[in-house]
Image (cartoon, rainbow, N blue to C red):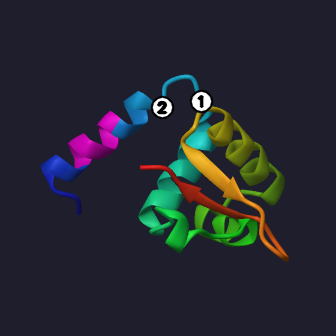
Amino acid sequence: MQNKSEEERNTQEVNSMEGVSSNAEKVYMAMKNGGVIGEEKMATAERITAISKLPKNMVLNALQELQSKNHVKRKAREKAAGYYLVQ
């Protein structure tokens, strides 16, 4: 169970994300709750798919949408790209 200040913080974050789809919000919150914050904690699309419990194509579309709104950064790596939330 979340305390009030944590609930208020989550509500403020979702409100600041107006103009994004519900899937993008789900992916954002899954990444936040999964600790994918900052470049040192980046995750692949596969891992984000697992933690968000959404189909991979929906996650990839949501990640592109979040990138366009500057909520998520993508970093190309040798095998698979990494994604992380921008603070």
What is the total number of numbered labels drawn onto the structure image?
A: 2
Q: Which residue is mark 2?
A: 17
User: Which residue is at the front of the view, 46 or 42?
Assistant: 42
- Asked if residue 41 lies left or right of residue 80, the reply is left
Q: Residue at x 48, y 68 (%)?
A: 34
Residue bearing the label numbered 1: 20
What range is drawn magenta here? 7-12
Q: Residue at x 31, y 35 (%)?
A: 12
Looking at the picture, does residue 46 appear above or below residue 10?
below
Please tell me in which quadrant of the rendered image residue 33 appears. bottom left
Q: Is residue 10 magenta?
A: yes
Q: Which of the pair 41/54 is nearer the observer?
A: 41
Density class for disc 1 (Cα within 10 Å; few <14, some 14-19, many ≥20) is some
Which element is circle 1 on?
loop
**Which of the 4 image quadrants contains residue 50?**
bottom right
Q: Are marks 2 and 1 in contact (CB under 8 Å)?
A: yes
Q: Residue furthest left?
A: 4
The kind of residue on which mark 1 rests is: Val
